[in-house]
Image: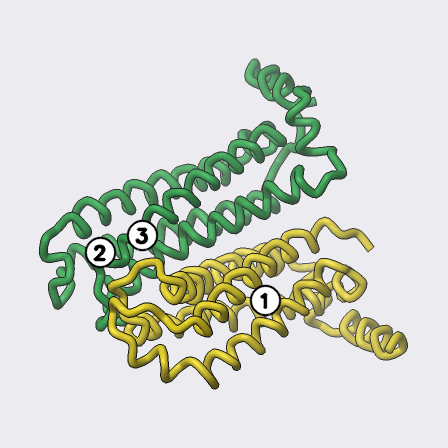
Chain colours: A yellow, B green
Amino acid sequence: MQPLLNGLQAWLESTRLSYFMIHSDFAWPICECLHFLGLTLLIGTVGLFDLRMLGLAKGLSLKAMHRLIGWGVLGFVINMITGSMFFAAIPYQYIYNGAFQAKMVCMLLLGTNVLIFYLTMRKKVEVLGPEDAAPFGAKVIAATSLCLWIAVICFGRAEAFFKP
Amino acid sequence: MPFYFHWFHWIERSAFSVWLRESPSALAFPNVLFLHTLAMGFVAGTNAAVDFRLLGFAPGMRLAPMEKFFPLMWAAFWVMVVTGLMLLAAYPTKAFTNPVWYAKFVFIALALVNTRLIEKRIFRDPDVDVQPVPGRWKLLAGTSLVFWAGSITAGKLLAHTYLRLFSY
């Protein structure tokens, strides 16, 4: 594992992207702004969808609300791209960073959670009326999603305080 | 040295300010930043969802029940204010000597007025779920997106644009 990580680090540090991210006055700040705007899109769409499944804001149809998830996906894509750019710029800051590792574990769990939702709950949720309560399984998935996204933000903030 | 630097110095020397900046506890500065970020996501995110709906995305979603998210949004707003004041107490000189900080403040003030207008003009309207959405409501949604995105962008840039960290 270690030679693999060392190789990845050395390769990333040799890329023009890494050089650009470190030496440009604007690249890093602009990526940070985009990363935070992406975070906001995710909470505003996925977060509110989770809250509705948990029973807040009855009267909203989950099927209709799901149309907003596209904005959350956009936020996620923005954050994957900008996040990868931070990682490529200074890989040693992240590879050995406990907060970053925890954040990645949360992201994997979130991916699994999303998969479980679409495989088991999507049809059950789609047929619900605006006033209907979501099934218990959907509530568990929603609560898991909210907790994990909050943890992602927490670890994301914490990783900047880590000095390797 | 301008006279107000003495005030900044007094704040920076206070036990609370020193604790925020220098405590190794994760409850100090990192935690305040985390709560500020989380609250930002809920406040701007909830507003963005309402704005997207007003602009015609997710047209099948009723607007009126979206107001049920507002108590949570306002609670998050106050978390944002309190943690923001704590960040200010930690680094007053850094904030007040940076023009970008004033830009952020103006953006937040505009965004706040905009959100209150959406609450009063749109959600108080008995025909809140009228289709199509009136043009002036869409305008409010557009300006809301611009102001909240401006607040976030200016806020994030504070870490990169400050001119002076301390009064001394």
**Image coordinates for residue B47, horizontal then vertical, percent:** 34, 54
Question: Dots 1 and 2: beta carbons under 8 Å?
Answer: no
Label 2 environment density (alpha carbons within 10 Å; few <14, some 14–19, many ≥20)? few
Q: Amino acid at mark 3?
A: Ser
**Image coordinates for residue A10, horizontal then vertical, percent:** 83, 73
**Quarter assignment of residue A125:** bottom left
Residue at image mark 3: B144
In this view, the residue in front, A102 or B37, is A102
**Image coordinates for residue A142, horizontal then vertical, percent:** 47, 67
Label 3 environment density (alpha carbons within 10 Å; few <14, some 14–19, many ≥20)? many
Q: Residue furthest front?
A: A136
Q: CA distance from mark 3 to mark 2?
A: 8 Å
Disc number at residue A82? 1
**Quarter assignment of residue B50:** bottom left
Residue appearing at x 64%, y 70% in the figure = A84
Disc number at residue B139? 2
Q: Amino acid at mark 2?
A: Leu
A64 horizontally vs A16: left or right: left
Label 1 environment density (alpha carbons within 10 Å; few <14, some 14–19, many ≥20)? many
Residue appearing at x 16%, y 55% in the figure = B136
